[in-house]
Every structure is written in structure tokens, then in C-alpha cells.
Amino acid sequence: MKLRKALLFWYSLLGLIVLLTVFSTILAPYSPNDMNMDEIYSAPSSDHWLGTDHLGRDVFSRLLEGGKVTLVVASGSVILSLFIGVVYGGISGYFGGVIDTVMMRLLEALITIPALIIILVFQVIIQGGMWSMALLIGLTGWLVTARIVRSEFIRLKEEEFVKMANMLGTPVWNILWSHLLRNSIPAIFVVTLFNFAAAIFMEVSLSFLGIGIPPAIPSWGNMLYYAQNDILIGAWWIGLFPGIMIFLTILAINFIGEAWKNPERRRVND
Amino acid sequence: MIGKWIGKRMVMGLIVLFIVSFLSFFIMQVAPGDPAIAFYGGNAQTLTAAEIERITRAYALDRPVAEQYVAWLGETVKGNLGISYKEGRPVFEIIMERLPNTVLLFSVTMFCIVIGSLWLGTVAGMRANSIWDRGLSTISIATSSIPPFWLGILFIYVFAVSLGILPSSGSGDVGGNGGMVDKIRHLIMPASVMIVTHVGIYARFLQESIKRENGQYYVKVARANGVLERSIRNGIVRNASIPYLNYIAMTIPSFFGGSIIVESLFAWSGIGQLTVKAVVTKDFPLLMGSIMVTGVLVVITLFIVDLIMYAIDPKLRKGGIR
Amino acid sequence: MIEVRDLSIHIQGKHITHHMDFTIPRGNITSLIGESGSGKSLTVSALLGMLPDDAKVSGSIMYEDRNVLDASDQEMENVRKQDIFTIFQDASNSFNPSVKMGRQLYAFSGERVGDSLQVFNEKMHVILDKLGLGWEVVEQYPFQLSGGMLQRCMIACAFYVEPALLIADEPTSALDMVLQKEFIQLLIRLNEEKGTTIFLITHDLDIVAEAAHEMIVMQQGRIVETGKVETIFSHPQHAYTKRLLESRF
Ligand SMILES: Nc1ncnc2c1ncn2[C@@H]1O[C@H](COP(=O)(O)OP(=O)(O)OP(=O)(O)O)[C@@H](O)[C@H]1O
Ligand SMILES: [Mg+2]
């Protein structure tokens, strides 16, 4: 009971964050890129709830707009990695044998290379912006999904109803789609949630290094990039709030993911 | 037995290094301009025709790409990583200067994380449903949701800007005025940021693993027969640490990724900061070098983890399933 | 030594034993016999105060003058350590797979009774020898030994400890006839010389006939018959017991 209430809280929090960012254009009191040189580094006040940054831009407005950018990049990349992961893991798990062995060895090797470095390198080579970043995070983020899909497929392949369908001559794509994939959905959902958190982490990390999203577009990671200097002159509000938003978003996703991992806690009511 | 097992691990490590080297080589290929210039970077203008000729021959630059790769790999293995575009010094030299810092930061944080998570995970795992058990489950999720570099920014604000008791950046110098103490003072913040954000999640993994192990038949038998709780616990932790080590091995790469950012934030002059610097200044030879060296570091770390696993798990050693 | 009254156990809403009443008298060999799945092993867990967390019990189990079902975990731990040795049914999973047998045998026997390693080595050597096991098993890991060897290792610990109460859940299931005979002789000697009370769960009526004084017959979670072995063998009352005895001859 208590657990379910807690879960409901995390759902609401995540929903609230998403809503705030989706409607950022309506909710933001200022335009996120409006500079006001008379009001640089002003601390939180009734005019600027969360203060202003080094160009006098309203931190609250940028926070909402930045959240939209961060969440859109993360969503885009997660969809991509979901697709690649399902295809790769599905092929490996369904065919098994040598194909599986080779694909898994390759995957093990790829897991060993820090994804951050790969993204860093390609982002700089292609001089990428926001979309290339989503693309790169997606291209490097599918490994765990592939593993999960593979083990689910291998498990399901041995199930009675799949063997039955095979014997009855059900077309392969039908087995793949309506038996294997459909029954893997809970597991895939959980790993995708965690992937989403990881993608947010990746975006903010890269933007924080100044390599991700171009400085003109606000994102949570970007805001922290400037914050590392602003903090030295005592302007704590510029770094504090984006970090809290990132923290809360990832926290909510993690708690929801944990709950889904554990099927008894899954439902919110009843 | 051990020979065969190590052999298998080595092959895996080599495959990884090959992929990393492809990545590196790819950078050189797509880097703007003449590969020879890309390679010898800042010094390119000063090269004589004879030197360009020599470079071209060493790297087989007039040959097909495959041969170029082999030639380049040969040079790399010999330790010739080219010349930094920005600093005009051999990349190998720059990396060697910075390697100790990265190794220091990594070993200190990993050591604390392993000790801390072993302790926390065991205490929480052995007492199912206690306050420790539930507390760790929640706190570990919370701490692992904190972006390390953000925590770093907060630390800088509190300890460097407000209290002024720790330096906000740099990596200290043992040879300098401060000596060892200075080094440690610089190390505290980056290390604790990594420890705080990682120890919980590793502890939690061990905790879950211990709880599972605690339900095993042999534990029940031991408890029923008055085996000392200490012996039982040691046995459980030993078995539970095998999946735990596996988990460490799985997360080491992203751990390295995290430390790149923390190094940059605190200007800790290690390989991670060097990588970011090379990316930002488009210093391709330096970038290739730091990527290669990171790959080697990861592979070596994984190999050490494997060896520990081999020592703990007799099934690996005896290769025996009845 | 143990008196069980009206013991019912259910797990996850499933009734496993119903209103069981029986006694394990001190100094005797009592055997429990019953079909597979009738709840024998679970009864052993109940006697030890080690039922799974999700089990619900009613009734009482009086061990000397305390009720096992009310006793604290700590109290039961002490009782078990003082008085009881239990040979569990599944010998091949009874040892930690990644610890050498020597260390584990010591933990189960010598360490428990407070003997030094040296004393343990001497005493255990003799016992293992009687059970047809070489000393080299102490250098091996559980997965390198057969099920029967592991069963004998457990038995060896039981003979080492010489507990006040020995509970043995199908201790000979993986042993051949010769070893089985040897084991029964050792068991009888332990009972006669040291006065050890023995609670022996088995499928094998030959063992019951040879070793036990009292017997308890169980079917589907109920006790259908209890009494002296000779009495039951000559005049079985319950249909299940009759069938059981018929299948023997
Ligand atoms: N931990 C448990 N959770 C749920 N049910 C259990 C548990 N342990 C045993 N059971 C159920 O209790 C019943 C009795 O099991 P038990 O192991 O006591 O049988 P048994 O008489 O020892 O059989 P066997 O001769 O095969 O060893 C079985 O139906 C079993 O499914
Ligand atoms: Mg049984």
C-alpha cells in the first residue's frame, strides 16, 4: 500500500516535469534567450524566481525550455536504441548458434568501450548539434536492450506455446511478432526506462563538457556548463536548479523502473 | 587450466583493443587535411620534403587504407603515437605525464567504492527487512541518480567558494611546495564525488546478491547445524561476490566515462581531462592517443577483475561441473 | 524428547500438514515413513523452528519444556547448536559450492563442539575411513564429489558431533546396499552407546525394521498410524500402512 502510494508520487512527479517542459513556451515568464545586460547574475527574486545568468537571461524560463530540449533528445535517442536493440537482440536470440555467439562476442567487446568517448569523438568529427547528439546516444545506447531481448527470446523460444506455433506452421514473422516480441514487452519496457535515464545522463554530461548541444539552445546540461564558472563567483542558482531537475527526473524514472522490475508492485491501484 | 582461461580473456581484450584502434584510425582518416599533416600536426609546416617522404613511408600513406592501418598499428604498438597538434610534443610523452594522475584517482575511488559497498552491501543483505536493508535500497537509487559533475559543482561551491578549505581545481604536485598533502587536498573532492555517486549502487547489487544467496539450501543446512554465523557469512559473501564482480566489470567502462567528466570539472590533469581537451581543440593525434590509452586501461582493469574472480570461484579454476 | 500436538502448517493458503500428533521419545530411534510430498521434510523444518517465512502454523511442538513455535530465533539457534544435528535430504546442495570440504566439515563438526583443528583431523580421519571415504576429500570442493560421497560427509559430521538428537532426512538415498548397512550399524551403535535420540525419515521399510524402535506413518499431510515397529509390522491398522507393508514382501 505504502509502496503504491510512493509509486504514484513518482509517476506524478515525472508527469509534472514533462508537462512543465512541454508547455514551456506558455509557462515561461520570459523568452529563454532574452538577454538583459542590466540584470546579469541577479539572485532569485520575485522578478526572476530562479535568478538570471551571465547574460541576464531568466534561469526559470531557460530551465523549462532546456528541459524540453533534454527530454526530446533523450526520447529520440531511446527510440533509436530501442529499435536497434530489439533487432540485434532478436536476431541473436532467435537464430542462436554461431550467429548468436559471434553477435554476443561483438556486443561484449562493444560494451567495454566507454560510450561517452565514442560520442565525444564523433560529435566533434561531424561538428554535430542537437540531432546528431540524439543520433549518437541512440547508436551507442542499445547494447543492454539487445542483451535483454536476446535472453527473453531464448527463454520464450523454449516455451510450449511457441513450439506449438512452430509445429503448426505459423509464419516466422508472426511468431516473432505476436509470440516472442509481445511477451518480451514488460522486460523491454523496464530496460527502456533505464535507458531513458541513461540518455538524459549522457546528454547532460556531453553538454556539460561543451560538446553536446550548441550553446545557443538551452538544455539542462548546457546550463551546467556555464554554471561551473558562475559558481566560482558565488552565483549558485545557475547550477543548482538544472541539477535538481535532472536529479528529480532520473530519480523518478529509476523508482518507476525498479517498481516495474518487481511485478507485485507494478499496479498503482487495487 | 589457468593458461587456457587467461588465453581466452586475452583474446577478448585484444578484440576490444582492435575495435578501439579502428575507432582511432577512423579519426585520423576523417580528420581534415592530409593524414601526414594530421599526424604530425603542428609541426607539419616545418617538415622538409624528405621528412614527409619518411612519414609517408612509415605510415604507408601512399598505399591502400588497409595497409595504412597495419602500418599505423605497428607504429602505435611501438609507442609512436604521433605529435600533439597543439603542444608540438610527442603524444606518448604527454600521456605518460598524465597517466599517474588518472591511475591514482581511479584506484583511490575504486578502492573506496569496493570497500564501502562490500561493507554496506553485506550489512544490509544479511539483515533482510531491517532498516539497513530498506534504507540502502532507497538511498542507493537516490545517490546513483545524482549527476556526479553537478554534485561536483555543489562541492566546489561549498568547500572551495564558501568555506575555502579545499582547492576548486588542479591536481596538486607532489614535487611542489605542498608535497603529498597538497596532492591529497586536490584529490578529496573529485574522489568523493565519484565515491558518493557510485558506492550505493554497487552496494545494492551486492545486497541483492547476498539476499538471494542467503536463501540457498546450504545456508539453511549450516544454520540448522550450529555453524558459526561468521563462517556462514563469509561463505555467503564469497559466493555473492562473484556476480558482484561481474557487475563491476560490466560498469567499469561507464565508470571511466564518468571520471572523464569529473576530471574535466576539477581540472584534474589526467587522461580524461586530456581527452576532452583534445576534442575541444581538435588535436587529433592527441585524441587518438588518449582513446587508445583509455582502451588499454579498461582492458587491464577488466583483466584484474577477471583474475580476482578466478581466485574466488573454484568452479572456474577446476572447470568442473559435476 | 519432542511432543508434537495438533500441528498444522500451511504455506500460501495451501494446507500441507493437518493436525499432526506424535512423540519422539528420548533415547529411541523413531522413524517417520510416508509417501513423497506428504510433508516429511517440512515437518523437520518445523521441529527445527526453521519454517519458511511465509508458512503459517498452529498447534505446538514441545521440545523438552519449551514450545519451538513460540521460541525466539536466538533461542532456537542455541538449542540447535547445543543438542541437534540434522542431516538434510538434499546432500548435494548441503555444502557451500565454493569452499573446500575440509573447511566445511570442520565448521559442521569440530568448530561447533569447540575442538581444535588438530583434534578434528585425527577424529574425522577415523570416521571418514569407516564410511569408506579417503582423507583427500577435505582438499576437494563439493562439486567434485558425488551425491553419495556428500551424503557420507554429512553423516560423518553427525557421528563426530554425537548430538543429543539426530534428525536424518533420508540419509541413505544415494548410498549402495553395503554402505547403507554400514551406516545403520553406526547409527544403532550411536544410539546404544551414547544414548542419542534419533529421528529417521526414510522410504525404506528394511531400514525401519532393522533400526527403529518406534514408527510414524504419514500420508498426505496426516499421521495415519504411530506405534512400536513390531506392533505395526505385525498388525497394521490403516489401509495405507497395509499397502506399504504388502509392497515390501
Ligand atoms: N518452501 C515451500 N513453499 C511452498 N510449498 C512447499 C515448500 N516446501 C515444501 N512445500 C510443499 O509441501 C509439500 C510437502 O513437501 P515435503 O518436502 O515436506 O515432502 P516430503 O514428504 O519430504 O517428500 P519427499 O519424500 O519427496 O522428500 C509438497 O507438496 C511441497 O510442494
Ligand atoms: Mg523430503
Image (cartoon, rainbow, N blue to C red):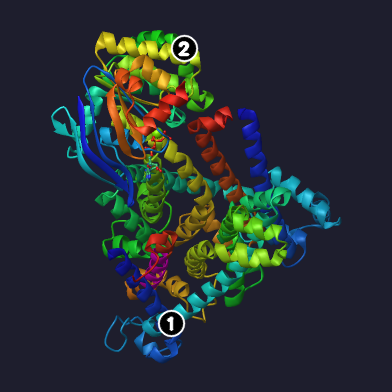
Q: Secondary structure at mark 2?
A: helix
Q: Quadrant of the C terminus of chain B?
A: top right
Q: Quadrant of the N terminus of chain B?
A: top right
Question: Could you say where residue C193 lies in the image, as x and y percent from the top left?
Answer: 27, 8
The crowding category of the residue bearing disc 2, from other C-alpha atoms within 10 Å (few below 14, some 14 to 19, many at least 20), is some
Reading the image, the residue beneath label 2 is C135
- In this orientation, does residue A89 appear? yes
Give the residue displayed 54% in from the left and 38% down from the top. B306
Label 1 resides on the chain identified as A
In terms of secondary structure, what is the magenta stretch mainly?
Answer: helix
Q: Secondary structure at mark 1?
A: helix
Magenta residue span:
A243-256
User: Given the image, on which type of amino acid does mark 2 rest?
Assistant: Trp
| Quarter of image, res C64 | top left
- In this orientation, does residue B81 appear? no
| Quarter of image, res C230 | top left
Q: Give how far apart the Cα atoms at labels 2 and 1 are.
A: 72 Å
Same chain, labels 2 and 1 = no
Tell me: is circle 2 under 8 Å from ligand 2. no
Question: Could you say where residue C224 lies in the image, as x and y percent from the top left?
Answer: 31, 34
Reading the image, the residue beneath label 1 is A21
Q: Is residue B49 found left or right of C70 in the rendered image? A: right
User: Most extreme residue toward the right, as rendered?
Assistant: B63
Q: Say whether residue A250 is magenta.
A: yes
Label 2 resides on the chain identified as C
Q: Say whether residue B223 is magenta.
A: no
* Tally of marks: 2
